[in-house]
Amino acid sequence: MWRLFLFAIFIYIVVGCSKDEQKTPISAEPDSIQLTPSSPLGHDFSKEEHPTIAHVRIVDLDQDGLQDVLACDVLGQHVGWIQQTFEGEFAERELLSDVSGAVHVEVVDFDRDGDLDVLIAAMGVILPTDAKMGQVIILENDGNEKFTKHLIATGIQRVTDVQAGDLDGDGDLDLSVAQFGYTQGQVQWFENDGEWNFSPHQLIDRSGAIHAPIVDIDNDGDLDVLALLSQEWETVYAFVNDGKGNFSTTILHDVADADFSSSGITVSDLDQDGDSDVVWTNGDAFVAVDYRPLPTHGVQWLENNGDLDFTYHRIGQMDGAYGPSIADMDNDGDLDIVTVAEFAFWDRPETRSVVWWEQQENMQFIPRTIAKSPTHLVTCDVGDLDGNGFSDIVAGGMALYPPFDRITRVTHWLNEGDLVTTSTETRIPTSVQTKVDQSKTAGEKGMVLHANGFEPREFYIEAIGDEPTNPRWPYYLGLLDVTVGDSASALAYFEQAEKLDAAYAPLQTRIGELYVGRGEIENAKEKFQGAKTDHATVALAHIAASEGLWLEVLDILDGTNIQAAASLMHTAKAKMNNEPHEPYAAVDMGYQMDDPWLQEVEKLCILSPHLVTQAQTNFIAGNVDVAEKLLRRAIEVDGTDKDARLALANI
């Protein structure tokens, strides 16, 4: 979420205001459920206030048998304890005041004295900056819920997560620390030296870290560190421990799409086979400059097959998906998933804000809507608040953009175990369906659906049968898989397309990017060198940069005249001269390759919201003329679209 603030001022000018309910795709959903109506928890807020709760955690902090809630309030500059004083009665007090940008809270008996202490990750500010304003804080509990603040680290890159575990096998608890930064960031582990003193150790020097859970990922008896890196990386890393605090780096899964928009991971044995799996949401809104969700937002999980081998599984689509939290919501013996939505079309009352993904047989999941209000939810947790044996839900609101008519600060839903189901359907706008019906071939039908955010796979597969020598159909299927994170399937389709046309440079570049994510660096270099485009050249230089080969970076980029190349060359020169430098630009900041085949699909877009999103992406990339044309097309499609008109006026 934190990268989106780069264009915060512009975003507030261009917001979703249209009332046309058929402008955007609605996800298929067989059933919806209803829990008890949501109820607010903690402090009230005035109508003029916009809540900014970055994280909530359910925990019995005072160990009185009643579950409480901790909440990170960014603009309130505090971490609140919403204490359950009597069954069903809650009162909030501040655990920590005057903390800048607290975004994550965890609870553990850190000093092993029998009570629960509180770990806090603070960014300093949530606006984008490379300023070192991050902090790691531990609140030491004296056993009577009086807390002493220990400032473990300050003046570091913006911290988004802190977790505790014995990482060096010496009997005390150490820390994993995710430092998102901005264009510079890192993941470290902090060795506990005793007396609240710690020594930091580097795990990876990359920006965009969101979460850094500690878990025995390889089942060898010691604790490892995972990290989710967003921004241009979109990768889940494992830092595998030898038991003594020495770590080796492994990529568990890499998405070769800088616009994947990762928003969070949770580690759990989802399939209950004795090892730890990873549940992963993507719902950030960086590319959609006006907070628009992407059709590829949703939920997926990485199945642990053992020996650090993981299989990607897509669970389903959800606009603006955040979370996720894991619990057996219906007490049927398997584990379900709960997610919330931050970036969605909230002017549409049918938009889902809380979804329970009910696990079925064979690890399939059915999405069930728990709530459509309140809106703008960025965090959730599950736990039995009322002690009835069923998991309840707590969520926190981050109201960054209008409408503000259904927002909340902290709210909860009580699960009584009595589920009421209703049915909903996927709706395709009449204009899109007409365009599909008018298309003469299966491939053309798929392209229309693809361009407008609907599922085109069936038609693309049919097109392969109709035109087996046309490389575009497997290529488009590969693009679809890339955008939802299924890298293995994407590579298979791209390789199928390559057999039909090995000369298409964007195809070679995309295969190279997937090879990088698999650690097949030599194969990646071969593809980038064969593509012979500026984008591929920069990708090749990034490989050299990751290995610290700065002179090679300069040689590779010599004669490449695009901003990404210039930025990387600037970094290389500064590194070679051991000078302070600004880091090179992130690849996802509007930097996309020229892809004529994909542009043929995009030309078929006839929905105004998608045209506006395309325009904003081009605007970021500096393609102002293209952006203007797209906005004018959007206005032609829907003259009432305020987003398009305001964006055009701003340009």
Image (cartoon, helix red, strand yellow):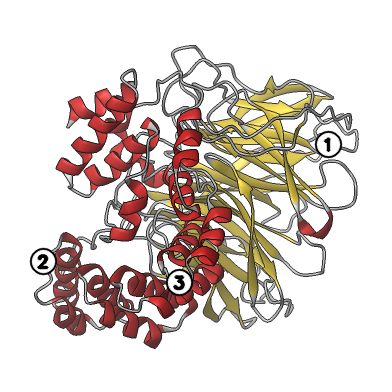
| Circle number at residue 528 | none
Choose between 195 and 266: the one closer to the eye.
Answer: 266
Name the residue furthest front.
440
Query: In the drawing, does residue 52 fall left or right of residue 635?
Result: right
Q: How many C-alpha atoms fall within 10 Å of the one at disc 2: few (<14), some, or many (≥20)?
A: few
Picture layout, residue 214 above or below residue 114: below
Residue tagged 3:
494
For the C terminus, give its image quadrant. top left
Q: Which mark is nearer the camera, 2 or 1?
A: 2
Q: Assign a secondary structure to mark 3.
A: helix
- Residue 268, x across and y down, in percent: 72, 59
Choose between 155 and 571: the one closer to the eye.
Answer: 571
Disc nearer the start of the sequence (2/1): 1
Residue at screen point 55% across, 71% down: 488
Residue tagged 2:
561
- Identity of the amino acid at label 2? Asn
Residue tagged 1:
64
Residue at screen point 85% across, 53% down: 334
Q: Assign a secondary structure to mark 2.
A: loop
- Identity of the amino acid at label 1? Asp
Q: Assign a secondary structure to mark 1.
A: loop
